[in-house]
Image (cartoon, rainbow, N blue to C red):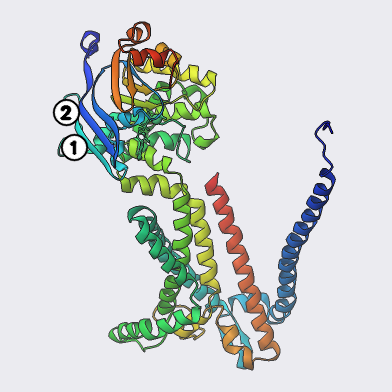
């Protein structure tokens, strides 16, 4: 039989399949969005009352956290979290980029793929293991430092920062490395042809071309650092006082797991409040970094 | 330098050049002189070694694993492959334009200043001067002078290629190597670049690889024909196209193979 035009009998069933698939994708997409919305709403509903009762200002800027005496100021924790995360990123980002460059550009492919596998493995290790390593290896070293400076020995902010650096490095390395690898060779060639050395070409042409990927790695790193609780609790000393590098510090994430079991009433509600603050923190950081990222790309 | 002096002066002298990519013998005993302030076209079928030869002139083959090169390339009587040669200085003097436009994903301004900055120019006024001079030299100044801070990737393909030429000019080279610079461009952009090349040869020695016989005939003074890694013949372009000495050259330019 002669075929006329561009239609076939199959067309109809094909378009039905497409339509069904579209609906399935739509449902999946909606489900994800709804989950996020529900979580946000729930966080606000459960966290807000305590903040209201304590007073927004008292809660966010109060310097004393003493649930026994109904003092619920989380400023020390907010500051400690900010300082810890910021310091960790400040060290881990340049270090991570250097390692990523080393892996993707400077060593032979086979060795690099072995190292990459190891680093990906490190990224997946449970944080409590990092905490354990920190408690065994880093804390004693810090103790010595504290003794030599005449300070009382204890877990401290510096230990927490070191652990955070070690924890977020694999993520930053892995994401940056992938981004650098994805940059077309032509940029490096163009740079070499202009009379740059190989290293200059890598750092001035290839790495900048990978910046969106590197920033994505940084976002993940920041997220992991600010949200980390377990490893930090094991090395930080956990006293809710204003942050100093060599004194005990409690991060935002720490109060919830430490006090949850025995808390009740307003104390427990305040823990929800901390959860809400943490949640907002991560949202804001993500939005800001994404805006920076968009700007950097244009 | 006056006109008479620059005429018929050998800029690049290639002697007994052999190149191996591992086992592949890509250039076989190539001897070729490239005249100063001329356009030299390299023609030949795909895989005959034109790009490879071009890249021996600024040592861009050095970056490839397993390359072995013997023989000599002299630039102004200085051996490019000699001991103690700094390839960064060589590449500053011998600029290169690639087949597909490859501006950096940065602003137009930063693309041009990339080379000069790398070579130590820091002063803003100097950089501004270089930018204007290079962009004018590449006949793209008028099109971009009001959008210096815009991304180079926002330009059209033809503009990007002229930007790449400007970027190469910014390091003040003597020689410009171009590897099929118009093969990714439309006819109008191609014409613009051809006109540009005619203008550039007043100040630069140009070596251009092309698959387009009309282009070679239009823009070049000398033409070298390569086949399977060998230099078959090189002459004045008119001579090559009107009375080729070698049967294989004739076959190629008349389109009988390749
Ligand atoms: N990096 C490389 N590794 C191994 N062999 C290569 C490499 N580059 C080129 N070759 C080989 O060297 C020979 C010459 O290649 P070249 O790129 O110089 O050809 P060409 O004349 O520029 O061809 P085209 O017109 O297609 O660009 C070819 O046989 C090619 O396969
Ligand atoms: Mg080629």
Q: Residue furthest left?
A: B83
The residue at 19%/24% (across/down) is B76
Q: Quadrant of ligand 2?
A: top left
Mark 2: give few (<14), some (14-19) or many (20+) Cα within 10 Å: few
Q: Is residue A161 visible?
A: yes
Provide the residue designation for mark 1.
B85
Residue located 52% across and 66% down the image: A222
Can you say whether A101 is above or below A159 in the image? Answer: above
- Residue A173 position, x and y percent, is 44, 62
Q: Residues within 10 Å of mark 1 (few under 14, many from 20)?
A: few
Q: Residue furthest front?
A: A1
Q: Nearer the viewer, residue A265 or A171?
A: A171
Residue B140 shown left or right of residue A262 in the figure: left
- Residue at the image point whose x is 43% and y is 38% from the top: B110
Q: Secondary structure at mark 1?
A: loop
The furthest residue to the top: B242
Residue B122 occupies which quadrant of the picture? top left
Disc on res. B78 = 2
Q: Nearer the viewer, residue A157 or A89?
A: A89
User: Is B161 rendered above or below residue A138?
Assistant: above
Judging depth in this view, the residue of B165 and A80 nearest the camera is B165
The percent coordinates of residue B27 (x first, y second) are 28, 30
Q: CA distance from mark 2 to mark 1?
A: 9 Å
Q: Tell me whether circle 2 and circle 1 mark residues in contact (CB < 8 Å).
A: yes
* Chain for disc number 1: B
Which quadrant would the C terminus of chain B be assigned to in this image? top left
């Amino acid at each position: 039989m002669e075929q006329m035009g561009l239609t076939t009998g199959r067309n109809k069933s094909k378009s039905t399949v497409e339509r069904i698939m579209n609906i399935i994708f739509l449902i999946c997409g909606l489900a994800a969005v709804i989950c996020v919305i529900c979580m946000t709403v729930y966080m606000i509903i459960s966290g807000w009352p305590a903040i209201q009762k304590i007073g927004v200002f008292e809660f966010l800027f109060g310097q004393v956290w003493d649930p026994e005496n109904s003092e619920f100021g989380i400023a020390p924790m907010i500051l400690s979290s900010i300082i810890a995360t910021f310091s960790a990123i400040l060290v881990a980002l340049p270090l991570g980029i250097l390692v990523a460059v080393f892996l993707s550009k400077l060593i032979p492919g086979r060795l690099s793929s072995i190292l990459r596998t190891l680093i990906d493995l490190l990224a997946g290790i449970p944080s409590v293991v990092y905490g354990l390593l920190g408690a065994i290896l880093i804390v004693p070293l810090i103790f010595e430092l504290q003794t030599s400076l005449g300070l009382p020995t204890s877990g401290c902010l510096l230990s927490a920062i070191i652990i955070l650096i070690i924890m977020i490095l694999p993520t930053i390395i892995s994401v940056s490395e992938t981004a650098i690898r994805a940059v077309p060779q032509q940029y490096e060639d163009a740079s070499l042809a202009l009379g740059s050395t190989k290293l200059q070409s890598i750092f001035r042409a290839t790495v900048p071309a990978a910046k969106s990927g590197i920033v994505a790695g940084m976002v993940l790193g920041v997220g992991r650092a600010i949200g980390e609780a377990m490893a930090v609790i094991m090395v930080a000393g956990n006293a809710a006082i204003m942050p100093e590098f060599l004194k005990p510090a409690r991060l935002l994430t720490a109060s919830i797991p430490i006090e949850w079991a025995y808390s009740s009433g307003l104390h427990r509600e305040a823990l929800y409040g901390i959860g809400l603050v943490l949640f907002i923190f991560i949202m804001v950081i993500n939005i800001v970094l994404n805006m920076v990222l968009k700007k950097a790309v244009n | 330098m006056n006109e008479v002096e620059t005429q018929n002066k050998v800029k690049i002298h290639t002697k007994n050049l052999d190149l191996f990519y591992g086992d592949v013998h890509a250039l076989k005993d190539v001897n070729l002189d490239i005249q100063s302030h001329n356009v030299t076209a390299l023609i030949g079928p795909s895989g005959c070694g034109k790009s490879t030869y071009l890249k021996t002139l600024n040592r861009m083959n050095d970056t490839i694993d397993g390359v072995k090169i013997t023989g000599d390339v002299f630039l102004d009587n200085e051996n490019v492959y000699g001991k103690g040669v700094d390839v960064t200085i060589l590449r500053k003097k011998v600029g290169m334009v690639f087949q597909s436009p490859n501006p950096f994903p940065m602003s137009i301004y930063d693309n041009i200043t990339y080379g000069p900055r790398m070579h130590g120019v820091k002063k803003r006024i100097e950089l501004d001067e270089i930018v204007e001079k290079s962009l004018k030299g590449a006949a793209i100044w008028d099109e971009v002078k009001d959008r210096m801070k815009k991304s180079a990737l926002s330009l059209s393909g033809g503009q990007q290629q002229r930007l790449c030429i400007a970027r190469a000019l910014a390091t003040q080279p003597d020689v410009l190597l171009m590897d099929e610079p118009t093969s990714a461009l439309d006819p109008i952009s191609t014409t613009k670049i051809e006109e540009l090349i005619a203008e550039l040869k007043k100040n630069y020695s140009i070596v251009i690889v092309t698959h387009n016989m009309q282009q070679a005939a239009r823009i070049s003074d000398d033409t070298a024909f390569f086949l399977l890694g060998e230099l078959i013949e090189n002459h004045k372009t008119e001579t090559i196209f009107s009375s080729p000495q070698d049967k294989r050259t004739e076959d190629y330019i008349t389109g009988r193979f390749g």
